[in-house]
Image (cartoon, rainbow, N blue to C red):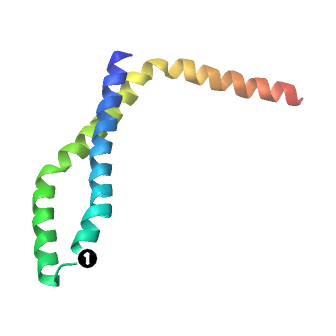
Amino acid sequence: MIGQMISLAFALLGAAAVYGTDVFFCVVGRTALAHVSDATLVETMGRLHEVADRRMPIFGVIGIVGALASIAFSRVSWPWALSAVARRSCGSSSTEA
């Protein structure tokens, strides 16, 4: 249970870092860059991507690894979940007959 919570936290933090970066740039960066010359825009975007290509993949990897680890830790609860689904589907078919 603790392992699943920790892995879920990593998955959420990784996804939040990527999402937060996208939202920030959508709200702030796009507006700020709308007022610069084309040459400045191209150079700025080139530099931003140069830095982001080196630093951002780690957050994506953390999110993916956290999600996969959470799935692996939740495997313990799969039999319970499957039995609950099976009981529900069997119960609904018996009430219809």
Q: Position of residue 41 (x, y in %)?
A: 16, 76
Q: Is residue 7 left or right of residue 51?
A: right
At x 28%, y 41%, the residue is: 14
Q: Is residue 61 above or below residue 94?
A: below
Q: Is residue 28 left or right of residue 77?
A: left
Badge 1 marks a residue whose secondary structure is: loop
In this view, the residue in front, 49 or 83, is 49
Q: Is residue 77 left or right of residue 48?
A: right
Give the quarter of the image for residue 45. bottom left
In this view, the residue in front, 91 or 48, is 48
At x 10%, y 66%, the residue is: 47
Image quarter in which the C terminus is found: top right
Q: Is residue 33 above or below residue 18?
A: below
> Residue pushed farthest bottom?
38
At x 31%, y 27%, the residue is: 7
Q: Is residue 12 above or below residue 75?
A: below
Give the quarter of the image for residue 72. top left
Graded by Cα atoms within 10 Å as few (under 14), some (14 to 19) or many (20 or more), the crowding at tag 1 reads few
Question: Disc 1 residue type?
Answer: Ala
Disc 1 designates what residue? 34
Q: Position of residue 57 (x, y in %)?
A: 19, 49
At x 11%, y 53%, the residue is: 54
Q: Position of residue 60 (x, y in %)?
A: 25, 46
Image quarter in which the N terminus is found: top left
In this view, the residue in front, 31 or 46, is 31
Q: Position of residue 92 (x, y in %)?
A: 79, 28
